[in-house]
Amino acid sequence: MSWRYQPVWVDHGEERVFSLCEVYIDKDGRLEGWTEKPVMEAIGIDDAQDLRDCLAQMLADSYRWKPVAFSSLKVGMTFERYATHEQMDRIAGLIEAMGKALEPQEISAALQEGQG
């Protein structure tokens, strides 16, 4: 079994609210379980890098999968991809570039290039 984030929505009257929940997927790509609430809570994050890694995974999964109604989650269901593998490779590159842009030595080099 593996897990990932799934974009979901909940209707509150006239308003549709989007969020992510954790889903647990079997080896055949079928839903086995999910978090009780449709809203993610920050738990088990030990430091800023863990937070960035978690947010990067959330961002990638929000592009990878089509959103579904939280109330429609059922054991055994499958999910539809939103982005192709090629598109996800480009998104992964953008996320990686964001992380590198914040590395101290690269910020220092960028500042020096800007002064030269």
Image (cartoon, rainbow, N blue to C red):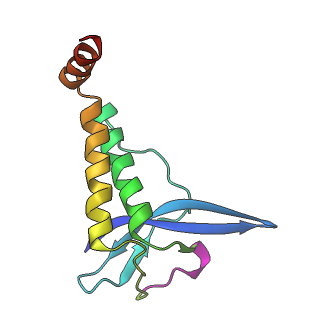
Q: In front here: 62 or 26?
A: 62
Q: In front here: 105 or 72?
A: 105
Q: In front here: 39 or 59?
A: 59
| Residue at figure coordinates x 44%, y 85% from the top left | 75
Q: Is residue 37 visible?
A: yes
| Residue at figure coordinates x 42%, y 81% from the top left | 79
Q: Residue furthest right?
A: 14
Which of the image's four quarters has the N terminus? Answer: bottom left
**Place of residue 30 in the rendered image (x, y in percent of width and height, measured from the top left):** 35, 85
Q: Is residue 102 above or below residue 39?
A: above
Q: In front here: 111 or 31?
A: 111
Which of the image's four quarters has the C terminus? Answer: top left
**Place of residue 51 in the rendered image (x, y in percent of width and height, measured from the top left):** 36, 39
Q: Is residue 47 visible?
A: no
Q: Is residue 113 above or below residue 10?
A: above
**Place of residue 73 in the rendered image (x, y in percent of width and height, measured from the top left):** 52, 79
| Residue at figure coordinates x 18%, y 21% from the top left | 105
The reply to whether the magenta stretch includes residue 76 is no
Q: Is residue 22 above or below residue 33?
A: above
Q: How many marks?
A: 0
| Residue at figure coordinates x 52%, y 72% from the top left | 67
Q: Which residues are magenta?
A: 70-75
Q: Residue furthest top?
A: 115
**Place of residue 101 in the rendered image (x, y in percent of width and height, measured from the top left):** 28, 32
